[in-house]
Image (cartoon, rainbow, N blue to C red):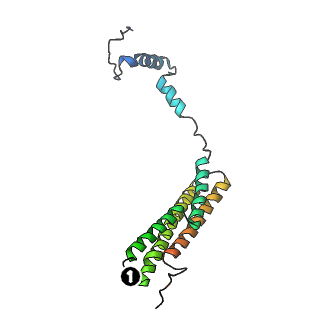
């Protein structure tokens, strides 16, 4: 067999370059002797064939706790909801400052602010529900993670019910203006 100069390029029948020549030569000699060839590519493949590592479940556990937190926040109210309600009340005051009957003033100042609070609480409840369902669907080992996910789902559903009741005035209606 002839040794090649590193600057020479020679094509073999399997279209490998001279840079692959040592591996190709080893493969050809191994085929003729029946010996096993260990190339860099073969070693890389062997390394990736390892058994998958078990997940610690830390992400699922954290998401379960976040789901419960979002559910609690949805039921107790959020800072964002409070700011949105105050903004809506201010907008209502500006709109009705030029006049308007008392029913319009109550609706614009208090009703719209109440509905803004309900909307933001509903968004947080929906997030709690989605995160809780996602965590509950994941296969994790720890039972407490499933318990937190289920609690997040329950708080999310409860938060959605309360928010919908607030938004559609099912629990309390706006006060009416006296005649």
Question: Which quarter of the rendering shows the N terminus?
Answer: top left
Residue 32 horizontal/vertical position (percent): 46, 17
Residue 117 horizontal/vertical position (percent): 50, 69
- Residue drawn at 43 percent across, 76 percent down: 108
Q: For the residue carrying disc 1, how many other residues have a C-alpha within 10 Å: few (<14), some (14-19), or many (20+)?
A: few
Helix, strand or loop at mark 1: loop
Q: How many marks?
A: 1
- Residue drawn at 36 percent across, 78 percent down: 98
Residue 123 horizontal/vertical position (percent): 49, 64
- Does residue 73 appear in the picture of this structure? yes
**To which quarter of the image does residue 153 belong?**
bottom right
Q: Which residue is label 1 attached to?
A: 100
Q: Is residue 5 above or below residue 125?
A: above
Q: Is residue 63 above or below residue 16?
A: below
* Nearest to the observer: residue 41 or residue 92: 92
- Does residue 139 appear in the picture of this structure? no
* Nearest to the observer: residue 61 or residue 1: 61
Report whether 170 appears left or right of 95.
right
Instruction: List the single residue furthest toward the bottom.
Output: 179
- Residue drawn at 60 percent across, 61 percent down: 152
């Amino acid at each position: 067999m002839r040794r090649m100069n590193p600057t020479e390029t020679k094509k073999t029948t399997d279209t490998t370059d001279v840079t692959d020549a040592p591996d190709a030569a080893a493969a050809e000699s191994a085929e003729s002797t029946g010996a096993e060839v260990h190339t860099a590519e073969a070693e890389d493949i062997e390394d990736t064939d390892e058994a998958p590592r078990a997940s610690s479940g830390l992400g699922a556990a954290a998401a379960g706790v976040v789901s419960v937190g979002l559910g609690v926040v949805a039921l107790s109210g959020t800072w964002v909801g409070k700011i949105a309600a105050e903004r809506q009340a201010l907008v209502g005051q500006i709109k009705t400052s030029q006049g308007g009957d008392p029913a319009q003033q109550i609706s614009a100042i208090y009703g719209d602010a109440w509905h803004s609070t309900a909307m933001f609480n509903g968004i947080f409840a929906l997030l709690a529900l989605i995160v809780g369902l996602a965590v509950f669907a994941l296969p994790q080992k720890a039972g407490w993670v499933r318990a937190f996910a289920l609690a997040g789902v329950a708080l999310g559903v409860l938060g959605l019910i309360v928010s919908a009741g607030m938004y559609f005035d099912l629990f309390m209606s706006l006060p009416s203006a006296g005649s």
